Image (cartoon, grey):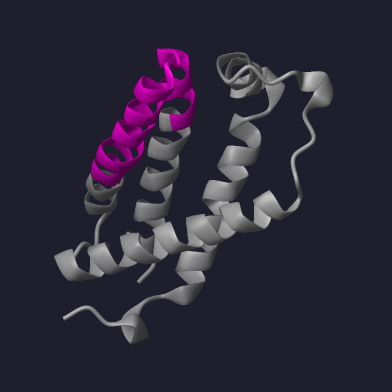
Amino acid sequence: MLSFNDLNWLAIVVAALVFFAVGAVWYQPKVMGSRWMKAVEVDPSKAAPNPWIFIGTFVAYFLMAMVLAMLAQGMGASSFGDGLVLGLCTGVVFVGAQAWVNASYEGRSMNLVLVNGGVGVIGHVLMAVIVTLWT
């Protein structure tokens, strides 16, 4: 049975912070930021995100890490390989597939799917490995 009491909350917070940091680097103009801005037609000179969006992003990553920890616990995952497979499955199927669906309905390019889906897969793999190994 899954239990919130048995989760490693520090591992969950660290996993969420790692994903947040990866996203911060990923969306820098010299990494994927310019590609993302072009795909969503954002003018860099007018781009000024609301600071509250970063709090919402961290909360979302925290919830994702918590659910990954619950899945890892429920599956009995305990190795790097277990975390890798869990992260790839959730990243590709939940994040990547959703990025593709959203871009398809919005008439956006595959570049957007690769940018948003790519960081999601990387983030899920890192979070799953952290919460799987750090039990």
Q: Which of 51/68 is in front?
A: 51
In this picture, residue 85 sits left or right of residue 22: left
> Which of the 4 image quadrants contains residue 122?
top left
For the point 29% across and 42% down, the residue is: 94
Residue 126 position within the rendered picture, expressed as x and y whole percent measured from the top left: 42, 47
Q: Main secondary structure of the magenta part?
A: helix
Relative to 7, does residue 107 appear above or below in the rendering?
above
Residue 87 position within the rendered picture, expressed as x and y whole percent measured from the top left: 31, 46
Relative to 19, does residue 69 appear above or below in the rendering?
below
Q: What's the magenta region?
A: 88-116
Q: Is residue 119 magenta?
A: no
In this picture, residue 78 sits left or right of residue 7: left
Relative to 71, does residue 124 appear above or below in the rendering?
above
Seen as rendered, the residue at the extreme right is 45
Q: Is residue 108 magenta?
A: yes
For the point 80% across and 35% down, the residue is: 48
